[in-house]
């Protein structure tokens, strides 16, 4: 060997000019330096960070809607035995009633039966579900929020029930809609339904969109050309009108709507992912993998998809908010979820039909506006987090 | 009026630090040097040694406030630059001190004509417009040796070659007859023959205009040719400083000695073994169609590789040399069937041209490739062990977990890396270490034939030498056959026993390495050799500008 091999000069690194060449190993669960930087960057966007936690809190709370707003108590003690009406449907006879029908816990008769037996009920804070009709409304539906009622307005109900005044009535915090259903309960359920629908739509359309974009970008050539033309034609269809036509033919339900909206929402990611794959397929490590004989599918999944995921993640919150918006729009027009479902769009359309009852429109608007703003704020923070050029300074 | 000065630029105890998050990195650590009128000072060092940062500090071109100077002073003509307000320093930049950057592709604005870009500087500092500005621009272009400057005025950067672009950059830098020219690796991105031309031009202009020059480079050959004084930088410090003659003949610092020893020298070429042919091509062609019109008819072809026949024998290294665009990388990819080509390719007796991807797979184990850019050729999202064992999954799917691990460890040992680092990610390694990982990925499959596509070009001189040694040792240990592609004749000389000189997709010269080096037949090979070993420009007409 010649003299060169005997030289032992440590190799310097461009990343850490003054430090060690190789930093100490990190724990398996700890974030990689890149992800830690992203998380810091996400946190640095204060508005997005707080929006994220607020949204998560609202979402997690709304997941437990049955324990917050329900016309069934979550615990009944009767005759020394425990009942959980939220989970199990009991017949009235279980509580000493006469009929085999499901127990109506809001019925004074049943309440009296339980009370007389020394039993008690533990109620959620709001004693209405999204489809409970308040039968003791003091004014014709839509009825004002209870705290806005005058003594004259509630006189009839107060006398009939033998109470002392409006304050003792069962509260409808945000009033009721035109069928006498509690607005607050409907908002909680509606928020949950919207977010879950949006999430489902986002996830499924992302999977389809990423797969389509990946195939186009990776194979290029004719595949790409034909697919692109197809997408151009597909996206030029006025989707909302087509959605209206389809949903008037099919019986709308959660999954039918999901399918219909999916027809058009999957294209939103295709261009982006296609571009990432087109760029990525010429990277040297892709060439290297090809030289190793790695199959196309493996290359796409293992090497290229992670690159495309950054762009996808950045777009997800925006796709989520647009999914929620589309669902609300369809509901508003009356082509959305089946009648009776707790939907924000339907609430808005009731607000429009009952302009004399501003609590409908205002609560609906505030809920939708808050939800969408939070999602946009989160989206902005995510975009910041994945921005490679963002520096702290 | 300016006070009389003895030194044009005096840099004293200059430090530069960068803040990132809460961490501060010291990139330049108490550096002192000075430049006299008309003198050329070279800053030499590896990437990351802080030489570019030093140069940018002089002009205060760093991203302040995330960069700052904890200590030091920079005096230009007895005027302190570090404390000068931004408006004042702008007057110095582009007028008294100018700078040329490494990458001529990106340092010119692609949307403006040459005339507009040079004219802007004349307008800013001299207030010249209209005809006088045009006359001066033409004069400058003529000075830097652009042919037909009147016609070139209306050209856009993409219409010029890399060398011509760098000439335009020099013209811009000279526009106001600066006292000091900072050249930040001005020839690194250029081909050897063009590099020689540009260096000659700079030298000539300097003598004619009496400028001082601060020349930043990692190439010791350039320093010897061009500089009067040299500062060797390492990890932000100047470790050795002195006249070029003295530093090159009697280096004092061990690092300088190591650098000098690592400089590739035309070693006697290794003897070619007489062994069976491993891979053979006959009249190999890679033509890319140029398509026009609605029906995308092919109206012509770019002949990247145009009828090349090679035969590589077991255990030997065939060097493929040529400038960028000569088709040498395309040739390597075509032999490995990574791009489609015409003409037979025979690997160990079986024709592999025309095989499908699936049918190619059994051959992939025996033929591997190492790419130029160690930053681009390793997936940033996979750990080293994942990267190396990827090929094992394909070709030896039946290996158990521990057998696979053993092979990965063996490959890492083979390339001189600590096997314990295999769970880390590529970004945690330096360029040279990454290139070792790339080599490990190739040899873990125990291939017969490896294409080395400029494996040392992206690396520092010291590391280049280490990688060349590694490749030579591996070849001996595993009886590997190499196809070594490079534009750097000095590196090829260290490894190849036979040589293939390519230009415009065709073979210009072919033969035993020592024969080609000693008695080059074609004028093009002669020009290449002169440029590579003596930094001499070829007579006009032989090579492109």
Image (cartoon, helix red, strand yellow):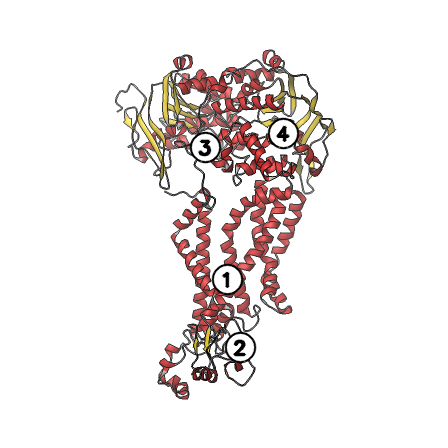
Label 2, label 3: how far apart the Cα atoms are: 85 Å
Label 4, label 1: how far apart the Cα atoms are: 54 Å
Vertical comparison of B427 with A31: above or below: above
Give the residue drawn at x 45%, y 32%: B117
Q: Which corner quadrant of the image does residue B59 belong to?
A: top left
Give the residue drawn at x 71%, y 36%: B359
The residue that disc 1 covers is: A195
The residue that disc 4 covers is: B446
Is residue B270 visible in the rendered image? The answer is yes
Chain under callout 3: B
In what element is the residue under mark 1? Answer: helix
Measuring from the top left, give residue B73's x and y in whole percent: 29, 28
Label 1, label 3: how far apart the Cα atoms are: 54 Å
Instruction: Check chain identity for marks 1 and 3: say if they share one.
Output: no
Chain under callout 2: A
Q: Which corner quadrant of the image does residue B297 belong to?
A: top right
- Quarter of the image with the N terminus of chain B is top left
The residue that disc 3 covers is: B117
Chain under callout 4: B
In the picture, measured across the screen, residue B279 lies left or right of residue B494, that is right
């Amino acid at each position: 060997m010649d003299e060169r091999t005997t030289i032992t000069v440590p190799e310097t690194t461009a990343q850490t000019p003054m430090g060690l060449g190789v930093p100490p190993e990190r724990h398996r669960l700890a974030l990689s330096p890149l992800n830690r930087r992203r998380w810091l960057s996400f946190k640095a966007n204060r508005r997005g960070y707080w929006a994220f936690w607020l949204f998560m809190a609202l979402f997690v709370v709304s997941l437990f809607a049955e324990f917050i707003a329900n016309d069934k108590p979550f615990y009944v003690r009767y005759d020394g035995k425990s009942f959980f009406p939220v989970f199990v449907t009991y017949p009235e006879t279980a509580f000493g009633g006469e009929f085999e029908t499901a127990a109506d816990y809001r019925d004074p008769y049943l309440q009296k039966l339980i009370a007389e037996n020394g039993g008690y009920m533990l109620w959620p804070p709001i004693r209405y579900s999204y489809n409970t009709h308040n039968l003791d409304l003091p004014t014709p539906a839509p009825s004002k929020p209870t705290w806005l009622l005058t003594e004259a307005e509630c006189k009839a109900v107060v006398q009939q029930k033998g109470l002392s005044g409006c304050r003792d009535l069962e509260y409808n915090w945000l009033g009721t809609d035109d069928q006498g259903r509690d607005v607050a309960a409907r908002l909680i359920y509606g928020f949950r339904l919207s977010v879950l629908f949006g999430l489902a739509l986002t996830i499924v359309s992302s999977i389809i969109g990423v797969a389509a974009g990946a195939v186009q970008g990776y194979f290029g050539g004719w595949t790409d050309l034909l697919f692109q033309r197809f997408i151009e034609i597909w996206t030029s269809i006025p989707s909302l009108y087509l959605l209206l036509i389809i949903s008037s033919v099919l019986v709308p339900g959660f999954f039918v709507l999901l399918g219909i909206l999916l027809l058009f929402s999957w294209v939103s990611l295709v261009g982006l992912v296609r571009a990432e794959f087109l760029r990525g397929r010429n990277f040297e490590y892709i060439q290297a993998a090809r030289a190793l004989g790695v199959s196309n599918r493996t290359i796409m999944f293992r090497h290229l998809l992670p690159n495309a995921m950054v762009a996808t993640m950045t777009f997800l919150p925006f796709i989520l908010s647009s999914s929620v918006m589309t669902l609300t729009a369809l509901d508003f027009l009356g082509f959305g979820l089946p009648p009776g479902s707790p939907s924000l769009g339907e609430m808005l359309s009731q607000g429009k039909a009952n302009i004399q009852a501003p609590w409908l429109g205002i609560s609906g608007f505030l809920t939708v506006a808050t939800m969408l703003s939070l999602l946009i704020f989160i989206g902005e923070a995510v975009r910041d987090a994945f921005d490679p050029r963002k520096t702290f300074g | 009026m300016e006070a009389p000065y003895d030194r044009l630029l005096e840099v004293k105890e200059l430090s530069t630090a960068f803040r990132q998050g809460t961490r501060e990195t010291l990139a330049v650590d108490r550096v002192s040097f000075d430049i006299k009128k008309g003198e050329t000072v070279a800053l030499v060092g590896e990437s990351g040694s802080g030489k570019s940062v030093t140069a940018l500090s002089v002009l205060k071109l760093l991203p302040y406030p995330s960069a700052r100077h904890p200590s030091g002073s920079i005096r230009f003509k007895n005027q302190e630059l570090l404390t000068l307000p931004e408006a004042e320093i702008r007057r110095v930049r582009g007028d008294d001190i100018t700078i040329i950057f490494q990458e001529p592709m990106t340092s010119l604005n692609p949307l403006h004509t040459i005339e507009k870009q040079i004219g802007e500087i004349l307008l800013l500092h001299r207030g010249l417009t209209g005809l006088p500005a045009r006359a001066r621009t033409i004069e400058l272009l003529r000075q830097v040796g652009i042919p037909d400057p009147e016609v070139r005025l209306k050209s856009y950067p993409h219409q010029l070659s890399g060398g011509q672009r760098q000439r335009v950059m020099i013209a811009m830098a000279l526009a106001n007859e600066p006292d000091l020219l900072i050249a930040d690796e001005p020839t690194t991105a250029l081909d050897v023959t063009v590099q020689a031309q540009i260096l000659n031009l700079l030298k000539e202009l300097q003598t004619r205009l009496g400028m001082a020059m601060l020349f930043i480079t990692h190439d010791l050959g350039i320093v010897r040719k061009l500089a009067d004084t040299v500062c060797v930088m390492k990890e932000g410090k100047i470790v050795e400083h002195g006249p070029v003659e003295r530093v090159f003949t009697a280096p004092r610092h061990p690092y300088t000695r190591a650098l000098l020893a690592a400089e590739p020298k035309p070693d006697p070429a290794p003897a070619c073994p007489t062994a069976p042919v491993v891979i053979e091509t006959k009249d190999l062609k890679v033509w890319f169609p140029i398509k026009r019109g609605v029906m995308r008819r092919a109206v012509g072809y770019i002949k990247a590789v145009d009828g090349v026949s090679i035969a590589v024998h077991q255990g030997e290294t065939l060097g493929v040399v040529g400038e960028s665009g000569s088709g040498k990388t395309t040739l390597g990819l075509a032999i490995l069937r990574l791009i489609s080509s015409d003409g037979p390719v025979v690997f160990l007796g079986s024709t592999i041209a025309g095989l499908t991807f699936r049918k190619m797979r059994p051959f992939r184990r025996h033929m591997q490739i190492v790419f130029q850019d160690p930053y681009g050729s390793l997936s940033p999202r996979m750990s080293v062990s994942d990267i190396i064992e990827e090929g094992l999954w394909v070709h030896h799917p039946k290996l158990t977990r521990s057998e696979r691990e053993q092979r990965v460890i063996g490959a890492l040992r083979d390339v001189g890396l600590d096997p314990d680092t295999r769970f880390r990610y590529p970004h945690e390694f330096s360029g040279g270490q990454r290139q070792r990982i790339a080599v490990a990925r190739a040899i873990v499959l125990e291939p017969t034939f490896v294409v080395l596509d400029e494996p040392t070009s992206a690396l520092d001189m010291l590391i280049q030498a280490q990688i060349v040694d590694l490749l030579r040792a591996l070849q001996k240990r595993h009886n590997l056959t190499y196809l070594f592609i490079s534009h750097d004749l000095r590196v090829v000389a260290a490894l190849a026993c036979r040589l293939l000189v390519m230009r415009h997709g065709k073979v210009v010269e072919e033969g035993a390495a020592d024969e080609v080096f000693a008695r080059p037949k074609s004028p093009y090979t002669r020009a290449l050799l002169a440029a590579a070993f003596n930094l001499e420009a070829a007579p006009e007409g032989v090579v492109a500008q």
